[in-house]
Amino acid sequence: MRFSISNLFKKKRDASVVVTSINLRWKGQMHALGGMQINEKRFTIAIPFQNKTQQDALQQYAALKEKFKAQEVPPILISSIQLSDPFKFVSVEPALPITVKSGEKVEMKVTGEAPAYGYSGPITVTLSSSEARMVKIQINKVILTTERKSVEIENSGVILNMPPNGIFKNSIQMYKALSYGDVVTNVIASPPFEFEGAEPKLPFTISEPSSYIVTFFIKAPDVDYAGPMEIKVE
């Protein structure tokens, strides 16, 4: 995150206020900024803020871009802003609570009120957030099922922390249960999961003689889950 400061000129003041440093506190970390001199009763600190989106595997597949958005990190909800004494928080634009969506940049203009007497020292701006709800998915094994057999995929256990009903990927070597020339026209994920798509798209034919890996896109439930996940192909 980058931060910048500007003065908002309101009423003139007699006493000079010198801010030696501006400290931004966010999630237990402190970001130190340069100082400023305040010659007005009210002043503004402009804070460009970004909720960074991590690269998601969904973006790798052009065939699915239109159907799925990149899996998002949860939005950040900034619920309160505080200024350290002797300063007073007045307002912020946009108004609280401020929702910063995944990948979105927001400039928060924090307006504060300086003390009526001379002051020299730091100011701390504390941002507090309300965390979006997450679900924990613990898949101990993935089972691939066809009309002929069911096989357990080796080393397929995974633990995920993600938004409710978020989409995750699972790549499977299809030769574990299918043979060269087999055609897959339908896929079913065992509840509480839902099949959302595949790369390559349905229908697909097992057309490579030695290896054929398919990436399945699965919708997670809206509650925590622990146990196996079965993917049935027809």
Image: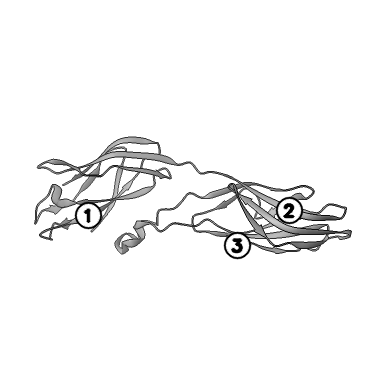
- What residue is rendered at 39% in x and 36% in y? 224
Is 223 situated left or right of 42 in this image?
A: left
Number of the front mark, 1 or 3: 3
Q: Which residue is mark 2?
A: 123
The label number, if any, that marks residue 214 in the structure image: 1
Q: Up-down: is 139 above or below 61?
A: above
The image's colouring method is: one colour
- What residue is rendered at 20% in x and 44% in y? 153
Amino acid type assigned to the residue bearing label 1 in the image: Val
- What residue is rendered at 36% in x and 40% in y? 137
Amino acid type assigned to the residue bearing label 3 in the image: Arg
**In the picture, which quadrant includes the N terminus?**
bottom right
Is 85 situated left or right of 16 in this image?
A: left
Q: Which residue is mark 3?
A: 2
The number of numbered discs placed on residues in the rendered structure image is: 3
Q: Report if the CB atoms under discs 2 and 1 are less than 8 Å apart.
A: no
